[in-house]
Amino acid sequence: MTVQRPGERPATPPEQGGAGAGRGYRMLAGTLLLACIGGVVYFAAHEPARARAGADGRGPRSQQDSGDIDASRTAAMARQPLHPRRAQARPAADDLASVVVPGTPAPSMGEVIEGLHRAGIHTGLGAFNPPGTSPPLVGLAVPEDYVLPEGYVRHYQATDDGQAIEPILMYSPDYQFVDGAGQPVAIPADRVVRAANAPAGLPIRQVRIPPPQAASGSSS
Amino acid sequence: MSSRVCKTARPLFAGLALTLLCAPTLANTLNQNVSWTIDRSGTTAKYRVVAYGDSIYAGYNGSTLSAAKYSAPTVDAEYLSALWNADVESVRRTKSGAVASDVYNNKIVAERSYMQASSTRVVTFEMCGNDGLQARSSFKGQTGTCNYNVMATAEANCKTYVAAAMDYINANAYSGTKVKIIANLYYPGYNADNVQSSCNDPTTGAKVNLRDRFLPSIARMNYWMCEYARLKGFKCVDNFAEYMGADYDSNGDGQIDSQALKYVAGESEASYVARITGALKGTLRDANAHFISSSSSADYIQSDDVHPTYQGSTVTAGLFGGTTSSGAPRYTSFSGGKNPIWNLYGHERMGWLLSLYAPASANKARR
């Protein structure tokens, strides 16, 4: 039986990953501790300011408030000229923006959702599926002037960044399809018509999903 | 598991995720506020459409930094700009991931000043989608005996805050506001939910079909959104009917599916839920393929299988703030009251539905 003395690290059982894994866990624990401390410090520093602001971040900007802020700084900044700057609106504590460090790259929404899920959080943004869960279908292009045979559908799609995708050919859910012998033909689950089964007269060409375009920002 | 997260994630993501765990309040929502003015050429008058809500009205597009420029309220503003021959400012005060109580407290109440401006002519809101999504996530994760209370809680919260929001808007919106509108819920992931649960029904002991459990809940929430609208002087945009039902008569009952699915003013909850979950259930289709005719369909749902598709560019809205700007309309006239893409994208459809309740003039009350 191994006895652990106060201050002594417990031995890592081999089945739990050995020494390398132990180092990994210690590093993770340290990182977690630092992150926790950082989070507490961050919120301790910002909660008062957030409390002073309105719930919408557009709280009162009265002279009284400005005086309070300046007074608290006076002792530490004696004889230094003060340059008033309008306080930045602080995001609410449950807003993702409140935990992102300014000047660092923003995480993608997929990363945020994955992070929340891995942390066991399935509320808020954690209740969303990540982008790409049900991606646009790729199929045969259907030119607008192509007259659809009965039982087929022209299906319109768009990318997540608002770009139109050329319509593709699909089977209608209202029809059953049979072969030359009158036997039912299985339709793909996604109802997308494959090139080998394209109706006569349709040029065989797969649509191309437009690549993501750069965010257009706040301009028109 | 945790060490794998740290190895694979970007440094910021690791920091972000860890901080998420430690933060005094869980950071799992995202404010996405936009003010976009439809700047119509040769006009000087300017009116405002104020929209409160969650990721739907936000124009969420799977980004932490941007959102659709033309989400439904802004599509509506474009219609109104032509109708009123005026500039129309689309003010979107939204929080992605917010449940109904959050939308009510932190957007509608806390940001009431936006609807109190004397230029306000339309106030609209949507909520409850995240209550439903969270209940669904919780239920999907259940093992052992199913606990249906998660859905009941979502329904109860939805009813409470929808009613409260209407009362609050009625009491606080600018007195010259011409129309107030609520938009109800479509069912995202209708096909994906057609699977068995991991938990077992407490009575039968058998697995249950997720969709069969969720559909009545959504129907009840939607009923009360439209019923409260009727009782409290709001209009109700029936997204459920317009997203989930085809724009043709697919079952030969003599009615266009999307029209047959609509809430009927004054009907009982039992009647509405029975129609949606019974007689008309066969006409419901996943909005990933909304049938605009018997030979054409449009994908109304983005790749996350949750949010509506949209047309065009994006605006800054998210981690690094929002947008206040303006631009010329995409369309300046509307044949038959519809733009050419009104039925090809989820947000276009919703925005067109909002426009149906527009007063003919910004200065006259709707009759």
Image (cartoon, coloured by chain):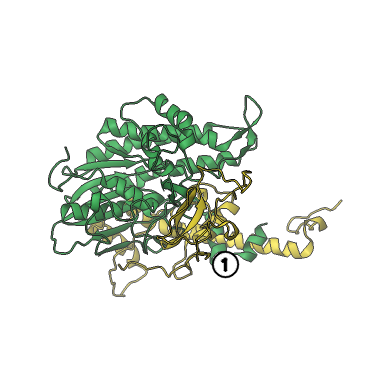
Chain colours: A yellow, B green
Q: Residue furthest front?
A: A181
Residue ID at (35%, 49%): B349
Give the left or right position of residue A20, taking residue B116 as reference: right
Find residue B183 and report its horizontal and vertical position in percent.
Answer: 34, 42
Find residue B231 and report its horizontal and vertical position in percent.
Answer: 28, 30
Question: Alpha-carbon neighbours of circle 1 within 10 Å: few (<14), some, or many (≥20)?
Answer: some
The front one of A171 and B221 is A171
The front one of B197 and B261 is B261
Find residue B350 and report its horizontal and vertical position in percent.
Answer: 34, 48
Q: Residue furthest right?
A: A1
Relative to B189, say whether A218 is above or below: below
Residue ID at (57%, 67%): B10
Residue ID at (57%, 60%): A195
Letter of the chain that mark 1 sits on in the rendering: B
Is any atom of residue B156 visible in this view?
no
Relative to A122, say whether A85 is above or below: below
Amino acid carrying label 1: it is Arg
Q: Tell me the element at label 1.
A: loop
Q: Residue furthest bottom?
A: A80
Relative to B139, say whether B333 is above or below: below
Where is residue B218, by image quadrant?
Answer: top left
Is any atom of residue A187 visible in this view?
yes
Find residue B28 and report its horizontal and vertical position in percent.
Answer: 48, 52
User: Which residue is labeled 1 in the image?
Assistant: B10
Give the left or right position of residue B126, taking residue B195 as reference: left
The quarter of the image holding the C terminus of chain A is bottom left
How many numbered circles are shown? 1
